[in-house]
Image (tube, helix red, strand yellow):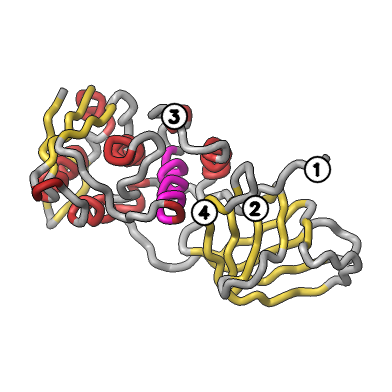
Amino acid sequence: MMEPARYGLRGDNGMLRLAEWRDMDGFFVGHESAWDNFENPSEAPDAISVTLRRVDWLDAVADRPTRTIDLGDAVLEVLDAQGRVMGDYSIWDTRVTLSEGSVDAAVTGYVGSVPHTRAEWAWDARRPGRPAERNVWAALPVGEREAWVEVARMIHFRRIVQTYPVLAEELHLDGRHVADLASFFCALGEAVNGPGGYCGTNITGMSDFLQYANRPAAKRSRLIWHDMSVAERGLARSVDLDGRPIRYLDLLVRQLTDDGVDIVPA
């Protein structure tokens, strides 16, 4: 029995899925850190060159001569264990090259940012369903946890009906693993939206979420930050803001407070 497909390809105009496959090379190769995202943001698209392995073409045409297909804008879908779409990546100026006699295919195009090198691991961790416990992401080493936030964001916007969360009056952030900026966003997402939850991939996205969140009786929320001493080390890095250096920890606390969340160290 063939193993189930993990990915699919379709045009972004709603057409039927064109192909499915299980493995590929050259897609999950990004290394942008959460630090870089804040300190050196870039809006320029990135070129990708991907090889799809053992592709199942759903139009059932067996004889495929060598040719290149110009799809224009397309969507690469990530499928769960039941074949349902968990999330998707937009690809612009997509070209698919088929070689006669080969079961593989080459895809080129442009993406807003290259998918993180460990995002495949994060997708695999989420395929069986939502995590039952927090901190699954802590299995990733520091420097690779951006992948978990990337996947959590896509799943959130794909499946959550209510984009902005309902903030409880009291929230609890498990700070044991907040060893860098990406770790903070992993932990905050779970404090706000439960295991595997999302609340921004960067400071701007976090602020947007919190500003538009629903609060009972418009009250402020309290964030009980457990083991905050870990962040004293992990978020001690400074960034220049308005001509003055500020620690990321102080910047995050200030932004959370501005957005209606009071920090209670614990």
Tell me which numbered mark, 2 or 3, is placed earlier along the sequence. Answer: 2
Q: Is residue 129 left or right of residue 146?
A: right
Tell me which numbered mark, 1 or 2, is placed earlier along the sequence. Answer: 1
Residue 2: numbered disc: 1
Q: Is residue 175 left or right of residue 1?
A: left
Amino acid found under the numbered disc labelled 1: Met
Tell me which numbered mark, 1 or 4, is placed earlier along the sequence. Answer: 1
Label 3, secondary structure: give it.
loop
Residue 73: numbered disc: none
| Span of residues in magenta | 145-157
Q: CA distance from mark 4 to mark 3?
A: 20 Å
Mark 4: few/some/many CA within 10 Å (<14, 14-19, 20+): many
Residue indicated by mark 4: 87
Amino acid found under the numbered disc labelled 4: Gly
Residue indicated by mark 2: 7
Say which residue appears at 21% left-offset and 44% top-offset.
167
Q: Nearer the viewer, residue 117 or 170?
A: 170
Say which residue appears at 38% left-offset and 29% top-offset.
134
Q: Foreground mark, 2 or 3?
A: 3
Tell me which numbered mark, 4 or 3, is placed earlier along the sequence. Answer: 4
